[in-house]
Image (tube, coloured by chain):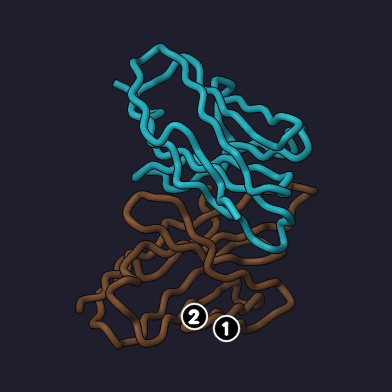
Chain colours: A cyan, B brown
């Protein structure tokens, strides 16, 4: 079966711009989580969606937002980009939290 | 904040040797998971151990969990050059209905030399 698909793979944006990242989960997985990975802070949880509802949110500013569609596909949006937003953004989907998560290959965002 | 802390931060071994990585965490957990990441790519789920389990095997992997010490270990036996990667433990914590929030450690960078 197809894995978790994230698009685009790479992105370069300018400070102040906004960006939208996309994630298509494994078919049948209704939970989608987003993580930010940086060399300094490591892997940090952004938010989690289940059946189009945000169930949990990490400690990130309001510039980071997301949504989930009825087909479980998810998008995350970062507005007013800052240099510190440069990171690998990972999406993960799950059928049930007790069975682990499948991660996508990530979107590498560079803010210049 | 990081809950899991892996030890060592880096490990270099020869092919065929065993590699052991340790993870400590702070709060009560539903389960603990180990993931592998190759050079800045996506994470690959290796194994999940529930809070009521003490040991689990999957192929060349063996994971132990000691909830009294809030620690886990990952053993990779007969390592191969292809095992070269970063390994992360992640805890699915028990706190107030919070879900989908894995807390990762900073990882152990394993290098297996042919």
Q: Height in image: A31 above or below A16?
A: below
Chain of the residue where label 2 is placed in the rendered structure: B
Q: Residue at x 37, y 27 (%)?
A: A11
Of all residues shown, which one is farthest toward the left?
B114
Disc 2 secondary structure class: strand
Residue B45 in the image, given as x and y percentages of width and height: 54, 62
> As drawn, is A83 to the left or to the right of A98?
left
Question: Few, some or many C-alpha atoms within 10 Å of disc 1 (few <14, some 14-19, many ≥20)?
Answer: some
Q: Who is closer to the viewer here, A110 or A4?
A: A4
> As drawn, is B19 to the left or to the right of B93?
left
Q: Are marks 1 and 2 in contact (CB under 8 Å)?
A: yes
Q: Which mark is residue A46?
A: none
Q: Height in image: B85 above or below B71?
A: above
Reading the image, the residue beneath label 1 is B57
Residue A25 in the image, given as x and y percentages of width and height: 62, 44
Chain of the residue where label 1 is placed in the rendered structure: B
Residue A111 in the image, given as x and y percentages of width and height: 34, 24
Reading the image, the residue beneath label 2 is B61
> As drawn, is A63 to the left or to the right of A88?
right
Residue B96 in the image, given as x and y percentages of width and height: 79, 49
- Quadrant of the rendered image containing residue B94: bottom right
> Could you tell me which quadrant the N terminus of chain A lies in?
bottom right
Q: Residue at x 38, y 31 (%)?
A: A109
Q: Height in image: A68 above or below B17?
A: above
Q: Residue at x 21, y 76 (%)?
A: B113
Disc 1 secondary structure class: strand
């Amino acid at each position: 079966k197809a894995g978790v698909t994230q698009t685009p793979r790479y992105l370069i944006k300018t400070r102040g711009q906004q960006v939208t990242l996309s994630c298509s989960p494994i078919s049948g997985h209704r939970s989608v989580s987003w993580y930010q990975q940086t060399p300094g802070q490591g892997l940090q949880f952004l938010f989690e969606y289940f059946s189009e509802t945000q169930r949990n949110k990490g400690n990130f500013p309001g510039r980071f937002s997301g949504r989930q569609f009825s087909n479980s596909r998810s998008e995350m949006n970062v507005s007013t980009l800052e240099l510190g937003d440069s990171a690998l953004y990972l999406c993960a989907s799950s059928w049930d939290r007790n069975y682990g998560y499948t991660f996508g290959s990530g979107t590498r965002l560079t803010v210049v | 904040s990081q809950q899991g802390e892996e030890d060592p931060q880096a490990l270099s071994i020869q092919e065929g040797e065993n590699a052991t990585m340790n993870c400590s965490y702070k709060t009560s957990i539903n389960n603990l998971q180990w993931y592998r990441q190759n050079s800045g790519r996506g994470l690959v789920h290796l194994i999940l151990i529930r809070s009521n389990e003490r040991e689990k095997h999957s192929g060349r992997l063996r994971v132990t969990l000691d909830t009294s010490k809030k620690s886990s270990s990952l053993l990779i036996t007969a390592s191969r050059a292809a095992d070269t990667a970063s390994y992360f433990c992640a805890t699915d914590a028990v706190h107030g209905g919070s879900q989908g929030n894995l807390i990762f450690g900073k990882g152990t960078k394993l290098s297996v030399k042919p």
